[in-house]
Image (cartoon, grey):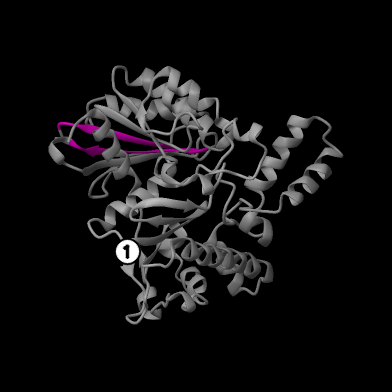
Amino acid sequence: MSSLPVLVLNSGSSSIKFSIYGAGNGERARLFEGAVDGIGTDLGKFWIKDASGKKLVDQTPPLPNRSVAFKLVADALNNGQFPAPKAIGHRTVCGGPTVRENQRITPQLIDEIESYAALAPLHTPIAVYIMREALKLFPGIPNFAILDTYFHRTIPEVAAVLPIPREYSALGVRRYGYHGISYESIIDQLQPEVPDKLIVAHLGNGASISAIRCGQCLDTSMALTPTGGIISGTRTGDIDPGVLLFILHKIAETTPNAAEAANKLETVVSKKSGLVGISGVSNDMRDLRQAIKAGNAEARLAVDKFTWTIARWIGSYVAELGGLDMLVFTGGIGENDIDSRAEICAGLGVLGIELDAQRNHVRGAAVISAPQSRVTVRVIPPAEDLIIVNHVVRLLGIV
């Protein structure tokens, strides 16, 4: 068994995903993975499987809250059946303006991250809760916050500074960028031949795109919060601020309390917009493709808006990079939706991007560009847990 088992935690609104990697003596092998799903519902599931995919735990326990769910994970990993973790890495979406580096978690650090929860309100409150519980349920084990924003710290000020009064910039309002661990994993997989001019599109229920020069982030679509940038499953992406003011005024007609009105607006832009808002069908690309086959015009418009928006961002990033060597698709849609990749690239021939229809008919890692394409187009699944493990080992001071 590994001399350094590292536990990776990735918590969501109704789930806690985790994996255990062996990381001793240069080793990087996933030993086990699992999840607690359906927290707060009557459909709870708790499972753990080994590296071969064999399920070792498969339960349907009551999961009334996150405390019960995480204790299940801790008890399972502390009972001797699995290697007890000697370090824990937490995927952390955002640490705000004062926490920009990956680092060991302390109670004070958790408080600091929590103070900027408004920057990622769907993720940070959950993450800080799990951090506090991990310190209690795994006493003496070093925990580390591994930030999605870390990769984007190289963005120049001209891209990071937002066009707002300085008093708000002083409060930390700026472009942070997200999905950074995914982008890091793509760079890691492209080693040792990382293209000078690279665009990576992380397309899933949450979607973003980044321009990367010589392995470092030059620009990224998400800004202060994950709601910005390109349209995604339930989020607006970039939008005319006047639209938000119009919606806020309509909300205020029946909601005089300012904080409550702001919360309702947050729900509109983060949970009811994007693909589901336009289509009225679903935020899931698979459902939308089925609806399109059935002749649903709104679903067709939603997907067209999605692919059109991404193509526009690619064009702007080619201009920013001064050319393009490689385009990479990653994330659930990027890896698996053949039609989205084809539709995004259909009008980008002028930029030297040309897909091969047969090569593109694939799910998973592949080169999908045509032989004559000036730009290489690839599909690369992200390996986020591995990047978290690498950072944990580095922060422990172990080569």
Quick check: 198 above or below 353?
A: above
Q: Which residues are magenta?
A: 3-23
- Is there any visible trace of residue 121 in the rendered image? no
The quadrant of the picture occupied by the C terminus is: top left
Amino acid type at circle 1 is: Ala
Residue 242 in the image: x percent, y percent? Answer: 76, 50
Q: Nearer the viewer, residue 317 or 267?
A: 317
Residue 177 in the image: x percent, y percent? Answer: 49, 45
On screen, residue 394 versus residue 126, left or right, reads left
Which quadrant holds residue 75?
A: top left
Magenta stretch: dominant SS? strand
Q: Residue at x 82, y 35 (%)?
A: 255
Residue under label 1, please give it. Answer: 365
The quadrant of the picture occupied by the N terminus is: top left
Residue 314 in the image: x percent, y percent? Answer: 50, 64
Q: Nearer the viewer, residue 288 or 64?
A: 288
Residue 50 in the image: x percent, y percent? Answer: 25, 44
